[in-house]
Amino acid sequence: MAAAATGACDFSKPSAATGKEATTFSHEVTYHASCEAVYRALTDTYDLSRMMRAPATSDTKVGGEFSWMGGAISGKYTVLEKDSKIGMVWRMRDWADQVYSTVTIALEADGHGVCKLSLKQDGIPVTDKFGNGGTDRATKNGWKERILVVGLSKIIGFALREEDDE
């Protein structure tokens, strides 16, 4: 079956959306939880499925692939530093074939049971493979509403503070 037909991406030949075709998103959230709990929630198959209320897979090793929300989001881990950093090549199924973004998630403990998560996503396409706009807004809203605030709160506890770099 062709990669485009399944929504899969050949990560050996990806290309990022660039220039006017791409945006960047940064967001910070502080949780009353350990960085270990936050890291696990973002990489563990069971926690990801619970958080997103949809099937997820996660081969938690550098080069390992993941699939979230029943395949609507997929990618490959590029950096995994236990309890402190996650790097990903990340894409949504409706993005143009072979277009991906890069996601970096940094976790910082304050020593008092609080973890600050800093997310940066580069190369988010403005339009999908069908020419529909708003892909960048949908991506940002998905992170904020479905993953970083509501989703993680179900797994680790409520967010204490949230900040945008927009």
Image (spheres, rainbow, N blue to C red):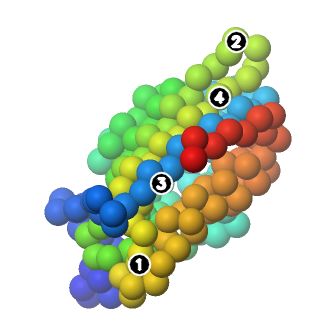
Callout 4 crowding tier (Cα within 10 Å): few <14, some 14–19, many ≥20: many
Which element type, helix, strand or loop, lies under badge 4? strand
Whichever of labels 1 and 2 marks the residue nearer the N terminus, that label is 2
Amino acid type, label 3: Ser
Labels 1, 4: front one = 1
Labels 2, 4: front one = 4
108 relative position to 85: left or right: right
Measured as percent of width and height from the top left, residue 104 is found at 44, 40
Q: Which residue is mark 4?
A: 116
Measured as percent of width and height from the top left, residue 19 is found at 29, 59
Tell me, for residue 111, which label it has, or none: 2
Cα–Cα gap, marks 2 and 3: 29 Å
Cα–Cα gap, marks 1 and 2: 42 Å
Which element type, helix, strand or loop, lies under badge 1? loop
Which element type, helix, strand or loop, lies under badge 2? loop
Q: Looking at this rendering, what residue extends furthest in the front direction? A: 20
Q: Which residue is mark 3?
A: 58
Q: Looking at this rendering, what residue extends furthest in the left direction? A: 13
Q: Quadrant of residue 140?
A: bottom right
Labels 2, 3: front one = 2
Whichever of labels 4 and 3 marks the residue nearer the N terminus, that label is 3
Q: Which residue is mark 1?
A: 128
Residue visible at 73% across and 49% down in the picture: 149
